């Protein structure tokens, strides 16, 4: 309870901070829109040259791409400060004050910043999802909508968990930005049908960095009725929860290795 | 009470070669050099003391303080604050300490100052009544009211330092670490900050550990000074004792219209020494052996000095003379 | 940073880069498998793979975000005021650093990575060397195009850095810069895949000279004459962009407000 109140106090502060840079926020939203449009257009240009990609039509691919943005946006809004932590904060000694306060360091990092740009992604993803679903002729049901909502929220939590896990390496090694970036970029793998990858990569994306579970599988459930939406929802909640718990434990363990700089 | 026992910190650094080619070479080498930043120091600090922790840059001050705050782990030896080792139980100790690192601010850069205080209130769970009381007191003491609603990035260095001090006191810590709190500030702000530190120390008997390069800070505040050089404590005691043993050395700098003949000047029985350089004369003497007025009088009337500056011994001088004395002993 | 930390960084960097290229590789494998034609928009499978690998290496060598990052850092912490006092021109300072980094990157990463990839592709028959003369000439022209590409990137990076005088924050600008360059320089997908109308325009914009053109020169898809034309266009753009940057800087520097005192 105390931490919920504390989180909202920090959230308020983070929003006030962010509002100081309205111009940058707007440019950031435009940047994300352009970034996603560019990637999407690239896919379009490529697929346009062939009849279909392993059986996926252009609209089905658009649906996949659109949905992949949703959990990403959810994570993006809440845990953006992990990037700073992994790249610069520890190296520049800016994490020291966090260790001098009587509340968990990870909590302070998560509460340090919010990223309103995420709404840009959420809206763009939603719009694409809608357009492509209409063109594909998806037969919506309560279960499928629930599945997509669960996959967005718990998918976001899973991404946050994985970010925490790899940002934690910076506690010992001062920087883990490149590693985090590399792992995070694996989300990009799920923008294409998973069948284009060899078995080892498919296993990696389902079992080790389970981005396929939160993105590919729900989309296959909606487009091809490949999975039962309720069972899949439960699976996603379970996997996301497990990843988050594991990551927080790992972070706390790595905190013991944290050392400030000498000077 | 803070107890430091045989505290040692050794940093290991890879021996690096320059450039990107060197980066690759370093990748495959196992060589590193060891730098002993703090070398087997022991120290006990009682509640309510104000300690001046001094030494040249790189002498090991920051490293010691960081171990005391718990953000560095000793290579060997221990620090305990009321029986707890801070680097083992950081969160527990954090509630009882306040930290101000002169060059870095704890405050959020881009929001009005008051918002930072509100967040600290929640973080340290300061009750409403206590918060209001302490804020009123700190506002009055440090005069931070006038810029309470300004974003921190628009504050001057002096304003920011006062705000940082107030933030560190908000939760009434038992121990306060101040790393160069007066660096780069003008005289009036320095005075204000010293007064505040003294008042808080008396009112709440806060233990203060202070590093500084300013002799005035030490004279006005510290009952005890601890001096560190090359990671070792070279002096631990009162300031007056230092002055006794090393003398209250003053230097008067004067400019003259002529070139003086040094051997003809009055040395007051060898108690005064002269040095002439670049059109200025430095007159050095021990204020405990000879009155300042008589030297000043001599400089003005007999030497007809037309400009005048007096300086007291600096921390660097004290460190140097202590080192020199130690070397002579050994 | 201790030795362990150092090794950790180098190893993660290598793995991460490999994985990035890998996803693109599998996409193209699937695309060509699904295609009824062996040649798509002028690229065979072998040409496409060599193009994608080379352009990813190229990106790493030629693009260094240092300039924009440092300017925006200096703006946000106020140290930019000190930089104005220094005798060396603000622009020259970054240009010199960038060229230094480029030189080091070419020697340490570019040379081995390009050589290894080139030899492998040549052995696999992905790249066909018709005559040693053309090969050496292409190599020379490629080097020139590489330096120009890096300078173009730096000039644009500088402009975006200076724009942070107005926004006081850089993240949004950085996103915008990276995306635009990646997309329009042919890094994400070769420009030949763009619709015909866009392709005609894009060939003459500075972005093409920042990645696709140099790589096409290296892969000897262009005759030396065409390559020279492309280099000339890149030089012209470089002049225009630098002039624009200087103009922008002289305006923006009046805008700088420094916090504190």
Image: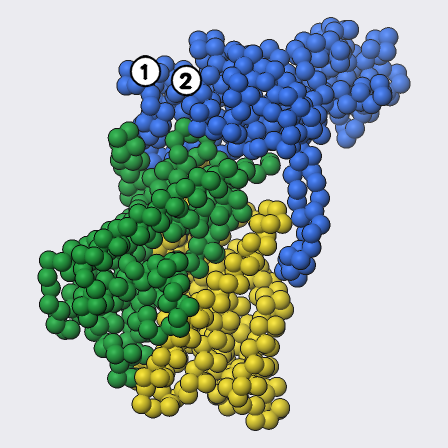
Chain colours: A green, B blue, C yellow
Is residue A220 something that shows in the picture? yes
For residue B49, what is the image quadrant?
A: top right
The quadrant in which residue B20 appears is bottom right
At a point 32% along the width and 15% down the height, the residue shown is B130
Asked whether the beta carbons under mark 2 and mark 1 sit within 8 Å of each other, the answer is: yes
Q: Residue furthest right?
A: B263
Res A180 quadrant in image: bottom left
Task: Report if residue A187 is visible in the image.
Answer: no
Determine crowd level at label 1: few under 14, some 14-19, many 20+ residues with C-alpha closer than 10 A: some
C236 over B266 or under it: above or below: below
Instruction: For the N terminus of chain A, give its image quadrant.
Output: top left
- Reading the image, the residue beneath label 2 is B172
Q: Nearer the viewer, residue A35 or A164?
A: A164
- Please, is residue B208 above or below residue C26 in the view? above
Question: Where does label 1 land, which residue?
Answer: B130
Q: In what element is the residue under mark 1? A: helix
Coordinates of residue A49 in the picture (x, y in percent): 30, 84
């Amino acid at each position: 309870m105390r931490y919920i109140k504390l989180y909202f106090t920090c959230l308020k502060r983070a929003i006030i901070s962010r509002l100081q840079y309205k111009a940058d926020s707007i440019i950031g939203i435009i940047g994300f829109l352009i970034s996603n449009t560019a990637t999407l257009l690239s896919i379009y240009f490529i697929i346009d040259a062939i009849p279909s990609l392993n059986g996926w039509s252009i609209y089905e691919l658009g649906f996949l791409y659109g949905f992949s943005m949703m959990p990403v946006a959810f994570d993006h809004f809440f845990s953006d400060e992990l990037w700073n932590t992994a790249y610069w904060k520890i190296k520049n000694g800016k994490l020291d004050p966090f260790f001098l306060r009587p509340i968990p360091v990870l909590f302070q990092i998560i509460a340090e910043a919010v990223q309103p740009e995420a709404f840009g992604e959420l809206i763009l993803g939603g719009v694409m999802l809608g357009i492509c679903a209409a063109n594909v002729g998806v037969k919506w049901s309560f279960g499928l909508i629930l599945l997509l909502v669960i996959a967005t929220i718990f998918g976001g939590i899973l991404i946050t968990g994985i970010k925490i896990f790899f940002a934690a390496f910076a506690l010992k090694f001062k920087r883990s930005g490149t590693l985090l970036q590399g792992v995070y970029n694996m989300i990009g793998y799920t923008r294409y049908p998973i069948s284009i990858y060899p078995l080892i990569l498919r296993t990696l994306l389902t079992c080790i960095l389970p981005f396929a579970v939160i993105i590919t599988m729900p989309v296959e459930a909606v487009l091809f009725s490949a999975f039962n939406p309720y069972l899949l929802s439960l699976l996603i909640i379970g996997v996301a929860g497990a990843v988050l718990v594991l990551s927080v434990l790992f972070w706390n363990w790595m905190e013991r290795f944290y050392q400030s700089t000498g000077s | 009470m803070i107890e430091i026992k045989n505290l040692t910190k050794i940093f290991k650094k890879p021996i690096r070669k320059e450039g990107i080619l060197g980066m690759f070479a370093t990748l495959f080498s196992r060589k590193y050099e060891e730098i002993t930043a703090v070398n087997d120091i022991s120290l006990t600090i009682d509640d309510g003391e104000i300690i001046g922790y001094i030494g040249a840059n790189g002498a090991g001050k920051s490293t010691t303080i960081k171990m005391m705050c718990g953000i560095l782990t000793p290579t060997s030896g221990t620090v305990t604050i009321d029986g707890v080792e801070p680097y083992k139980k950081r969160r527990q100790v954090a509630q009882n300490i306040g930290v101000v690192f002169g060059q870095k601010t704890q405050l959020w850069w881009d929001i009005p100052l008051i918002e930072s205080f509100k967040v600290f209130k929640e973080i340290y769970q300061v009750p409403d009544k206590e918060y209001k009381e302490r804020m009123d007191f700190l506002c009055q003491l440090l005069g931070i009211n006038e810029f309470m609603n300004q974003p921190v990035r628009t504050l001057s260095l002096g304003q920011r330092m006062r705000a940082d001090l107030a933030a560190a006191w908000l939760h009434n810590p038992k121990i306060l670490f101040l790393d160069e709190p007066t660096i780069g500030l003008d005289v009036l702000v320095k005075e204000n900050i010293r007064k505040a530190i003294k008042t808080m120390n008396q009112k709440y008997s806060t233990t203060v550990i202070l590093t500084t390069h300013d002799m005035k800070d030490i004279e006005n505040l510290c009952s005890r000074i601890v001096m560190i050089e090359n990671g070792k404590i070279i002096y631990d005691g009162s300031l007056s004792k230092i002055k006794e043993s090393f003398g209250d050395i003053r230097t008067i700098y004067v400019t003259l219209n002529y070139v003086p003949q040094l051997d003809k000047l009055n040395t007051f029985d060898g108690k005064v020494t002269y040095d002439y350089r670049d059109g200025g004369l430095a007159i050095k003497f021990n204020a405990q052996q000879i009155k300042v007025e008589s030297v000043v009088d001599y400089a003005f009337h007999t030497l007809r000095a037309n400009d005048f500056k007096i300086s007291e011994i600096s921390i660097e001088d004290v460190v140097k003379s202590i080192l020199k004395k130690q070397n002579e002993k050994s | 940073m201790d030795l362990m930390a150092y090794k950790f960084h180098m190893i993660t960097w290598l793995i991460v880069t490999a994985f990035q290229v890998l996803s693109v590789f599998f996409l193209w494998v699937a695309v060509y498998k699904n295609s009824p034609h062996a040649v798509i928009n002028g690229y065979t499978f072998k040409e496409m793979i060599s193009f994608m690998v080379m352009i990813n290496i190229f990106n790493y060598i030629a693009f260094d975000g240092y300039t924009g990052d440092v300017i925006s850092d200096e703006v946000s912490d106020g140290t930019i005021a000190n930089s104005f006092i220094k005798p060396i021109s603000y622009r020259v300072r970054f240009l010199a650093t960038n060229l230094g980094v480029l030189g080091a990157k070419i020697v340490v990463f570019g040379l081995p990575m390009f050589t290894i990839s080139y030899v492998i592709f040549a052995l696999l028959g992905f790249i066909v060397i018709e005559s040693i003369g053309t090969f050496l000439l292409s190599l020379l022209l490629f080097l020139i195009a590489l330096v120009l590409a890096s300078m173009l990137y730096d000039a644009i990076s500088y402009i975006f850095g200076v724009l942070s005088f107005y926004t006081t924050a850089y993240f949004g600008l950085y996103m915008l810069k990276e995306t635009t360059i990646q997309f329009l320089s042919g890094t994400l997908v070769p420009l030949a895949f763009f619709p015909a109308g866009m392709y005609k325009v894009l060939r003459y914009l500075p972005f093409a000279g920042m990645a696709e053109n140099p790589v096409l020169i290296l892969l000897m898809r262009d005759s030396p004459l065409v390559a020279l034309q492309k280099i000339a266009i890149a030089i012209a753009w470089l002049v225009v962009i630098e002039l624009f940057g200087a103009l922008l800087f002289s305006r923006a520097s009046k805008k700088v407000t420094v916090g504190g005192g």
